[in-house]
Amino acid sequence: MKNDNVVQIKSYAFAVRIIKVFKFLSEQKKEFILSKQLLRCGTSIGVNIEKAIGGQSGKDFFAKLTISYKEARETHYWIRLLKDTNYLSVDEADSLLKDVEELL
């Protein structure tokens, strides 16, 4: 991994956080449906950034980056929903929201 690609680094760190939140939600809160949605889209952000970096053309790069943006928007939605239904505390959710908004 290149050390100077901030989006690549931050999206990977965010994916690690999302995995930890998924484990917390499924193990501690016994929530399995919403947490899987969060896991899927929250880790997809970084995957699509990786795909964009390895894109074969400018159009390919843009397409993958657009997918990453859409996944970040979806992640933002699930975090808000988990916060408003008290699966995540305000502090936990706000910290995640801050990170995903930075990626957006």
Image: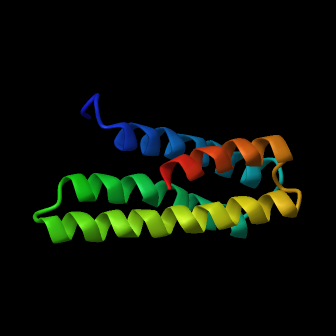
- Where residue 48 appears, as percent x and y from the top left, is 34, 60
How far across and how far down the image is residue 78, in percent? 68, 65
* Direction left: furthest residue: 56
Identified at 39% across, 69% down, the residue is: 67
Evaluate whether residue 102 shows in this view. yes
Q: Nearer the viewer, residue 40 or 73?
A: 73
Question: 55 above or below 63?
Answer: above
Q: Tell how many labels.
A: 0
x and y percentages locating residue 61 in the rendered image: 22, 63
Colour mapping: rainbow
Outermost residue, right direction?
86
Q: Quadrant of the N terminus?
A: top left
- With respect to residue 51, does 1 lie above or below? above
Q: Is residue 1 left or right of residue 9?
A: left
The residue depicted at 22 percent of the width and 52 percent of the height is 53
Q: Residue at x 84, y 47 (%)?
A: 90
Q: Is residue 82 left or right of residue 12?
A: right
**Residue at the image point whose x is 54% and y is 57% from the top:** 42
Residue 39 figure quarter = bottom right
72 w.r.t. 67: above or below: above
The image shows residue 28 at horizontal and vertical percentages of: 81, 47
Q: Determine if residue 31 is in view.
A: no
Query: Is 1 on the left or on the right of 22, as rendered?
Result: left
